[in-house]
Amino acid sequence: MSYWSWETFLDAFPIIITGINVTLGLTITSFILALIVGFVWLILESTPVKAFNFIVYWIREFIRSTPPIVQIFFLYYAWPMVPYVGTSFTPFIAAMLALGIHFSTYVSEVYRSGIDSVDKGQWEAATALNFSLKDKWFDIVLPQALPPTIPMLGNYLIILFKEVPLAATIGVVGILSIARSYGADTWSYLEPLTIVAILFLVLSYPSGLLVRMLENKMNRRFDKKSTKVKVTE
């Protein structure tokens, strides 16, 4: 039986931390993809063709209801075998696409809730003033719809960060993959895996506090707005 060794901990730490760039890079690129594709889902489901909307809805639900690791395996191992359209991806790209598209299904719902929160009178006023579709969205709707979604998007970013270690299963060399390799070479898994847990804690906990601060700030902002409305009434 092996016990905790500070010597092993200090030896493994500088090795494992070299993979932090890959872990953070995969998190950021996947989240950016999720933000972009989230808008795409929203646009596709806003078309006037009900049959098309129905198909898009169930595709999105299928992606959201299946585990991210299955989607990672599918893109890396199965997608290259699909006739005509199949192509091979590097482990990083396969993981980025799988995680980005998976979380885009949640991000689209966040966008929808933000847009639904815009008062109906704002839409009617923009129409009465003959605003173009572009000006209506970028000058009236989005400036009011996006700020309330920031805390929710922040929460999904933290969740995505915690899902990134799944990419180690297809060979993405992040901190978890390096820790496993170190453990296999030295037969010491306790210290390297503890380092991985500490790194995730150090990076995710402050992010969680920041999200809470943003959420509280947004709540105070909306409370002030509601108070003003009551006073004017």
Image (spheres, rainbow, N blue to C red):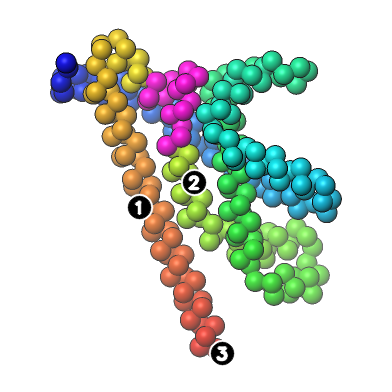
- The answer to whether one can see residue 143 in this image is no
Q: Residues within 10 Å of mark 2 (few under 14, many from 20)?
A: some
Question: Could you give the CA–CA distance between mark 3 and mark 2, rounded to whole angstroms?
Answer: 38 Å
Q: Secondary structure at mark 3?
A: loop
Tell me the amino acid under the disc marked 2: Tyr
Residue 166: say if magenta. Answer: yes
Q: Which residues are magenta?
A: 162-177
* Label 2–label 1 contact, CB within 8 A: no
Residue 69 spot, x, y in % from top left: 52, 28
Residue 211: say if magenta. Answer: no
- The answer to whether one can see residue 179 in this image is yes
Residue beneath disc 1: 209
Q: Main secondary structure of the magenta part?
A: helix
- At 34% from the left and 36% from the top, the residue drawn is 200
Residue 127 spot, x, y in % from top left: 78, 70
Residue 2 spot, x, y in % from top left: 17, 17
Residue beneath disc 3: 233
Residue 90 versus residue 52: which sits nearer the camera?
52
- At 46% from the left and 49% from the top, the residue drawn is 155
> From the viewer's perspective, is residue 198 above or below residue 124?
above
Q: In which quadrant will I find the C terminus?
A: bottom right
Q: How many marks?
A: 3
Tell me the amino acid under the disc marked 3: Glu
Residue 28 versus residue 118: which sits nearer the camera?
118
